[in-house]
Image: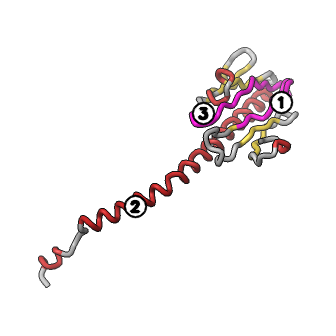
Amino acid sequence: MTFRHLHKHAGFTLTELLITVSIASIMLSLAVPSFTNLILTQNVWTSASDLQTSLVFARSEAIKRATSVSMVPSGGNWKNGWTVQLANGTVLRKELALNTQLASMTGGTITYQADGHIAPPVPATIKVYVSSNSRITPRCLAIDLSGRPSLLVSDGNSAHGCS
């Protein structure tokens, strides 16, 4: 065998390359919807966790500073972002808008008193979900009477606090 003879058999033919690319694109087209759902699920989880973290922060600041601390949704919609601020308007933390694919999460200002309790009325749960995709499990943020926020996973039963 000479070096020339080995060189002739190295590499791919155009037919082999086209078949490989075709198989790869078919497999990719089957996997993309699963990845889209995975990404949306993670967006819902992250957004709900961000809301919970801000509520915990607002509650701890109210207790630490012995004054009222409010969490105010931008434009009356948690999806647009929110600020954590003192009663005099001093902003302690500002959160940016959430993912644009998430559904509207309306609700009013949540105010923690100096003892860490919520000023009446206690808000209903804040639901984080994707309205265009029912396969993505919603997450709800509930605040108990003591002011502690907790995340709930929707099971479709409104008696459990998140429907």
> What amino acid is labelled 3 in the image?
Leu
The quarter of the image holding the C terminus is top right
Mark on residue 24?
A: 2
- N-term-proximal mark, 3 vs 2: 2
Q: Say if mark 3 contacts mark 2, CB within 8 Å.
A: no
Q: Say if mark 3 contacts mark 1, CB within 8 Å.
A: no
Label 3, secondary structure: give it.
Answer: loop
On screen, residue 1 versus residue 147, left or right, reads: left
Residue 136 percent across, percent down from the top left: 65, 47
Label 1, secondary structure: give it.
Answer: loop
Is residue 22 rendered magenta in the image? Answer: no
On screen, residue 18 versus residue 159, left or right, reads: left
Crowding at dot 1, Cα within 10 Å, few <14 / some 14-19 / many 20+, comes out as many
Residue that numbered label 3 is attached to:
98
Task: Choose between 156 and 81: the one closer to the eye.
Answer: 156
- Going 79% across and 22% down the picture, which residue do you hit? 68
Question: Can you tell which quarter of the image residue 107 is in?
Answer: top right
- N-term-proximal mark, 3 vs 1: 3
> What amino acid is labelled 1 in the image?
Gly
Question: Can you tell which quarter of the image residue 102 is in?
Answer: top right
Task: Choose between 132 and 138: the one closer to the eye.
Answer: 132
Residues shaded magenta: 98-127
Please say if 36 is above or below 55. below
Q: How many numbered discs?
A: 3
Residue 114 visible in the displayed image: no
Residue that numbered label 1 is attached to:
116
Crowding at dot 2, Cα within 10 Å, few <14 / some 14-19 / many 20+, comes out as few
Residue 96 percent across, percent down from the top left: 59, 29
